[in-house]
Image (spheres, grey):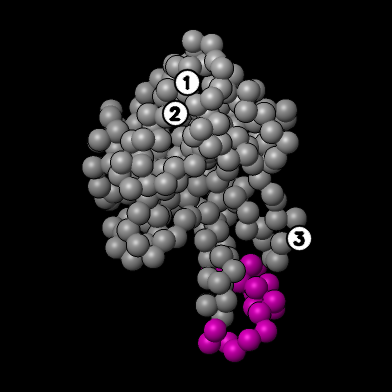
Amino acid sequence: MLRVKSFDELIQTPFEGGTNAMGWERSLQGDFQELVNKLASEENIHVVELEELRELQLSHAGNMARELILSDMKRLKDIGADPSLNIITHYEKDEEFVVFPTDVYSFHVDRSPIPTSTFLCTYFGATSEILPNADADQKIQMPEFREALRQVYDGNPSGFDDFLKEHFFDLHYQPKEGAQVISLPLGQIWRLAVDHPESAVLPCLHRAPLEKPGEKRLLLIC
């Protein structure tokens, strides 16, 4: 992982060598909890519309938080990204999983058919977590999981690998004993490498954190 000092540096620095995650170091200013409280929703995941955010009546500190988020969203849109601001109570868990869960609480990589990166920033609440590639095993390569998946698959043996991709089993990883899980700092925009045909590095392993009881998360992601 690499730390940079500006947004321009974040988007212009190439991933290379063992670096597949980089973050823009900065300190948050403003009351982001005020935004979360005033955007309260009964939904597990509430996607905040820009107009909804702009219409809020806020304190000075709350307005500082809003302006920072609006600035971040504009920066990302200006480079062609499609940022989404979410208030998260919790994600749906894969309760009836086949062999192993494939929800966002599992360490996984993102895949794209075109060159791109994943951007994310947690403004409030538990922050996203990443894991060095060397500290994890791809689950479909682990004998106990692979054999269990073969028992589930009932097609032609030549199609087994396609089956694994179609159901996203190949995107998930198991931390090794003693793995160093890294919680990304609050308020920093992070750029994560994605699995795509032109990538020069391994994709970044990441997961959603378990939310703290009674506390929502405010997350920007694209």
Q: Residues within 10 Å of mark 2 (few under 14, many from 20)?
A: many
Q: Nearer the viewer, residue 218 or 208?
A: 218
Q: Work out whether 209 lies above or below 68.
A: below
The residue tagged 2 is 69
On residue 144, which mark appears?
A: none
Q: Quadrant of residue 70?
A: top left
The residue tagged 3 is 96
Relative placement, left or right, of 136 versus 68 is right
The residue tagged 1 is 65
Q: Nearer the viewer, residue 35 or 96?
A: 35
Determine the main secondary structure of the stretch shown in magenta.
helix
Q: Amino acid at mark 2?
A: Ile
> Is residue 117 located in the magenta-colored stretch of the structure?
no
Q: Work out whether 204 lies above or below 51.
A: below
Q: Amino acid at mark 3?
A: Glu
Instruction: Report the span colored magenta.
Output: 140-159
